[in-house]
Amino acid sequence: MTLSRPFLEGIRIIVVEDKGDFLSAAKNAIEGLRLVREICPDVVLSDINMPGRNGIELLADIRALGRNDGGSVPVIAMTAYMVDQTLVDAGFQSILRKPFEADQLFATIDAVLSGRPPGD
């Protein structure tokens, strides 16, 4: 399996993850929000359970930026915990349950950027 996918060419992705076993652009929600403002990414992948501000709070902070400042960027939740209604109600475009495979990650990003439900 190759880790590159043609649809990812030129796509700006911010990963917000506090664990060292993930290659991350941001180690916490505050740094993730700063990068959203600076980079204007195409998609954000956010861990949910982080010290300080969690992924749900990060999503609310991103949405509060407003449409012109990156507040409408699609955000995908990543969690090792049971997915419950709280995550669905928070407004994530999709939820990835850890651990996940690269193909599942790519399919989720592609679906979110294409505006269709994951798994279609």
Image (cartoon, rainbow, N blue to C red):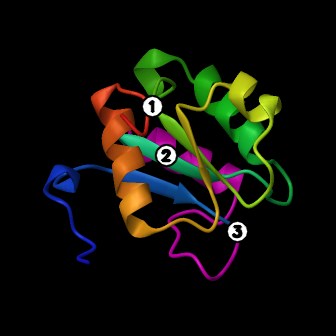
Q: Are marks 1 and 2 in contact (CB under 8 Å)?
A: yes
As for residue 31 lying within the magenta part, the answer is: yes
In the image, which residues are magenta?
Answer: 18-40
Q: Position of residue 109 (x, y in %)?
A: 38, 46
Name the residue that disc number 3 marks.
Answer: 18
Instruction: Report whether 29 appears left or right of 69.
Output: right
Q: Earlier in the sequence, mark 1 or mark 2?
A: 2
Identity of the residue drawn at 64% across and 21% down: 64
* Mark 2, other Cα within 10 Å: few <14 / some 14–19 / many ≥20: many
* Residue toward you, 100 or 65: 100
CA distance separating discs 3 and 2: 14 Å
Which amino acid is tagged 1?
Val
Residue 73 tag number: 1
At a point 34% along the width and 25% down the height, the residue shown is 115
Question: Does dot 1 land on a helix, a strand or a loop?
Answer: loop
> Where's the N terminus, which quadrant?
bottom left
Residue flagged by tag 2: what amino acid is it?
Answer: Val
Q: Which residue is mark 2?
A: 44
Q: On the rendered structure, is 48 left or right of 31?
A: right
The answer to which image quadrant residue 91 occupies is top right
Neighbour class for label 3 at 10 Å: few (<14), some, many (≥20)? many
Q: Position of residue 4 (x, y in %)?
A: 22, 68
Q: Position of residue 72 (x, y in %)?
A: 47, 23
Judge whether 96 appears above or below 74 on screen. Answer: below
